[in-house]
């Protein structure tokens, strides 16, 4: 059973916000006090300290640990590709899924390096969503079904969840979700994606504007069915299931972050347990992070997707906890405090 198993319809998602667990303030406070007693000037480890305190709050422990990290990559295909918004054919989605499964992609190597168990979930690749510039991508039942697939993929025993995606055309979908959620013109939210030139980006911006205008009445979680894809819906489902189990989440780049905009629109509290692994080279991502109030862990000029930036950030998170748990306090080390 998952948090979404008995949900009657997509509209009922918003009401879950009042039922979900929250961070343990006392544990976070104890972790903060420990950080301030370690053999370093207070705040000297910067964001590493913030990460340790964040993890303490969600694990409810002064000394949080990551024994098991799970990485999930969801893959889907998109009807908007019929508009020519991507330089690669949709067949590449399935080909890349096969590459993931064979261990040949960047995410496979990064998960091995960071110590994450990777699973790849392909979502009806032979049945793309509908073209968002002419119709809703999915009906409400289809969106909820994909959300349930995401929720069902979460390992209840994980200490942290790394999320990523794959789907030809989904940078256009990400731009549409961001634009619908926070306003502006499509040109402010689109980027090169997998290699679009200036004309390609102009076409993407036009398609985003058309899609957002067509579905301007869709707000909150309804945006997911109107403008999203199956992998975006699965990401939302995984985020909710992780929250129900107090598992912190590391989101990947622009597409993965944009997938959560419908959750944020329904209730910003849905993303309280989410970190963002890196800021993408896609120009809309930094703007989106500002709107969401999220600070990325890394900035490495990456724009690959697959969960690659989130997997790298997991290594930083592990390092933060090693310092938090392993460093001596001033009293233990016999070092004088100022």
Image: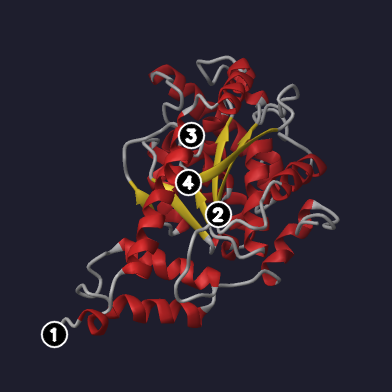
Find residue 194 and report its horizontal and vertical position in percent: 46, 23
Q: Nearer the viewer, residue 116 or 132?
A: 116
Q: Which residue is mark 4?
A: 115
Q: Nearer the viewer, mark 2 or mark 1?
A: 2
Pick whichever of labels 2 and 3 is earlier in the sequence.
2
Task: Name the residue beneath numbered marker 1.
Answer: 338
Q: Are marks 2 and 4 in contact (CB under 8 Å)?
A: no
Q: Is residue 53 above or below residue 197?
A: below
**Crowd band around label 1 with a 10 angstrom C-alpha radius: few (<14), some (14–19), many (20+):** few
Q: Please name the residue that numbered disc 2 is placed on.
A: 68
Say which quadrant the C terminus sits in. Answer: bottom left
Find residue 181 and report its horizontal and vertical position in percent. 56, 49
Instruction: Classify 127 as above or below 10.
Output: above
How far across and down, in percent of the image, does residue 130 sit?
Answer: 72, 28
Residue 208 appears in the picture as rendered? yes
Disc 4/disc 1 C-alpha distance (Å): 38 Å
Q: Residue at x 63, y 41 (%)?
A: 232
Vertical relation: 247 (above or below) 85: below
Q: Earlier in the sequence, mark 3 or mark 4?
A: 3
Rounded to the nearest whole Å, what is the CA distance between mark 2 and mark 4? Answer: 8 Å
Left or right of residue 91, residue 58 in this image:
left
How crowded pointer 3 is (Cα within 10 Å; few <14, some 14-19, many 20+) is rated as many
Closer to the chain start, of discs 2 and 1, is 2
Q: Which mark is residue 294?
A: none
Numbered badge on residue 107: 3
């Amino acid at each position: 059973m998952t948090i979404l198993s008995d949900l009657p319809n997509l509209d009922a998602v918003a009401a879950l916000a009042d039922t979900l667990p929250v961070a343990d303030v006392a544990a976070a406070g104890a972790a903060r006090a420990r950080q301030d007693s370690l053999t370093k000037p207070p705040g000297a480890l910067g964001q590493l300290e913030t990460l340790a305190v964040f993890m303490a709050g969600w694990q409810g422990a002064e000394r949080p640990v990551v024994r098991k990290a799970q990485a999930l990559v969801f893959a889907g295909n998109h009807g908007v590709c019929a508009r020519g918004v991507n330089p690669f054919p949709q067949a590449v989605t399935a080909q890349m899924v096969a590459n993931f499964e064979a261990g040949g992609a960047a995410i496979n190597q990064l998960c091995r390096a960071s110590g994450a168990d990777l699973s790849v979930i392909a979502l009806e690749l032979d049945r793309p969503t509908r073209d968002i510039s002419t119709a809703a991508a999915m009906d409400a039942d289809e969106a909820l079904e994909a959300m349930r697939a995401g929720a069902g993929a979460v390992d209840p025993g994980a200490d942290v969840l790394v999320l990523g995606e794959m789907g030809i055309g989904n940078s256009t979908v990400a731009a549409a979700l961001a634009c619908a959620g926070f306003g502006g013109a499509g040109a402010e939210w689109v980027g090169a994606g997998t290699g679009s030139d200036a004309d390609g980006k102009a076409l993407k911006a036009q398609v985003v504007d058309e899609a957002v205008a067509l579905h301007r009445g869709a707000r909150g979680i309804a945006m997911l069915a109107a403008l999203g894809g199956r992998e975006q819906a699965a990401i939302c489902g995984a985020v909710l299931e992780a929250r129900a189990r107090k598992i912190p989440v590391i989101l990947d780049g622009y597409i993965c972050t944009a997938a959560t905009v419908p959750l944020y629109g329904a209730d910003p509290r849905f993303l309280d347990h989410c970190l963002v692994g890196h800021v993408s080279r896609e120009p809309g991502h930094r703007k989106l992070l500002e709107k969401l109030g999220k600070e990325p862990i890394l900035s490495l000029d990456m724009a690959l997707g697959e969960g690659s930036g989130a997997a790298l950030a997991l290594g930083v998170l592990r390092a933060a906890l090693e310092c938090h748990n392993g460093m001596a306090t001033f009293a233990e080390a016999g070092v004088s405090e100022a």
